[in-house]
């Protein structure tokens, strides 16, 4: 079945709702919306955002939307990139970080998600604290190798106390056709140290992934 998008004016209006980053309206042949897909930040609760969408559609276009056709995906600002043409793309994000231990050894598995695709990387080594941070960084970089398309190694990965918070810091070494390239990235620890380490590696290479 052909996907129709016969409500470009509604899409444009939805993009002007505060917090909305992208909007897609799928319609029937008579331009009746059947699916509305929204990419937004986390400023509003999803239910409130859906109510805003319903109110706009009814007030401006006399369309009574069923809330069940509206799907909302919320991402942090660092997970969304805007290209020079104003198009919004979803950056790779950390879907999961898993650690399995056996005695003094550990294996870390990191899943990176970009759009509908998942990339899994692993790394094994000693299970001690400082080494574990490096294992997470190595597993993250392993998951990103296909996307990077160039040899890469982790030079440094650690957690640093700063201003009452803990910051994950990573340094990545790339080998490119133009020569050696050293990139650094950081991420604030939210709830999990390993997740922050993985995000710091992403922060280091995101511009490279964007081209």
Image (cartoon, grey):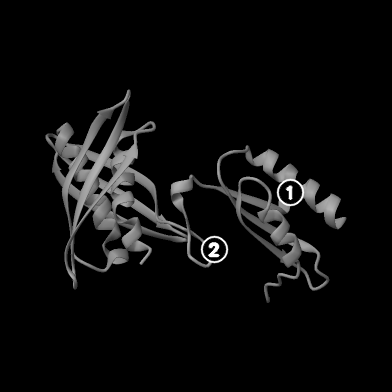
Horizontal relation, residue 142 to residue 42: left or right: left
* Vertical side of 164 occupied by 91: above or below: below
**For residue 100, which quarter of the picture?**
top left
The answer to whether 79 is drawn above or below residue 116 in the figure is above
Relative to residue 210, is residue 158 depicted above or below?
above
Q: Residue 106: image x %, image y %?
A: 18, 40
Instruction: Please tell me which residue is depicted at 80% across the width and 46% down the height of the picture.
Output: 55
For residue 106, say whether it is visible: yes
Q: Residues within 10 Å of mark 2 (few under 14, many from 20)?
A: few
Residue 201 or 208: which is nearer the viewer?
A: 208
Furthest residue toward right: 62
Place of residue 160 in the rendered image (x, y in percent of width and height, measured from the top left): 24, 32
Point 75% across, 60% down: residue: 10
Which SS class for mark 2? Answer: loop
CA neighbours of label 1 inside 10 A, class few (<14), some (14 to 19), many (20+): many
| Of 34 and 91, the residue lying toward us | 91
Q: Position of residue 183 (x, y in %)?
A: 23, 54
Q: Which residue is farthest front? A: 84
Q: Which residue is drawn at 32% across and 23% down?
A: 164
Circle 1 sits in a helix, a strand or a loop, which is it?
helix
**Looking at the image, which residue is at 28% across and 47% down?**
185
Which of these two is toward me, 40 or 103?
Answer: 40
The residue to which callout 1 is attached is 53
Q: Which mark is residue 124?
A: none
Q: Badge 2 is on which residue?
A: 86
The x and y percentages for residue 211 are: 35, 67
Instruction: Give the mark nearer the N terminus: 2 vs 1.
Output: 1
């Amino acid at each position: 079945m052909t996907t129709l998008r016969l409500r470009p004016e509604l899409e444009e209006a939805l993009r002007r709702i505060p917090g909305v980053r992208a909007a897609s309206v799928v319609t029937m042949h008579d331009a009746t919306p059947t699916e509305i897909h929204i990419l937004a930040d986390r400023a509003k609760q999803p239910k409130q955002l859906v109510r805003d969408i319903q109110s706009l559609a009814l007030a401006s276009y006399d369309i009574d939307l069923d809330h069940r056709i509206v799907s909302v995906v919320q991402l942090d600002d660092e997970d969304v990139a805007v290209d020079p043409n104003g198009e919004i793309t979803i950056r790779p994000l950390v879907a999961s970080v898993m650690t399995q231990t056996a005695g003094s050894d550990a294996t870390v598995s990191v899943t990176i998600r970009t759009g509908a695709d998942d990339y899994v990387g692993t790394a094994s080594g000693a299970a001690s604290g400082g080494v574990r941070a490096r294992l997470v960084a190595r597993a993250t970089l392993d998951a990103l190798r296909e996307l990077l398309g160039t040899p890469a190694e982790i030079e440094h990965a650690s957690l640093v106390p700063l201003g009452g918070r803990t910051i994950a810091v990573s340094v990545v070494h790339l080998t490119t056709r133009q020569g050696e390239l050293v990139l650094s990235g950081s991420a604030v620890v939210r709830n999990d140290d390993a997740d922050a380490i993985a995000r710091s590696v992403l922060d280091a290479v995101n511009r490279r992934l964007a081209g």
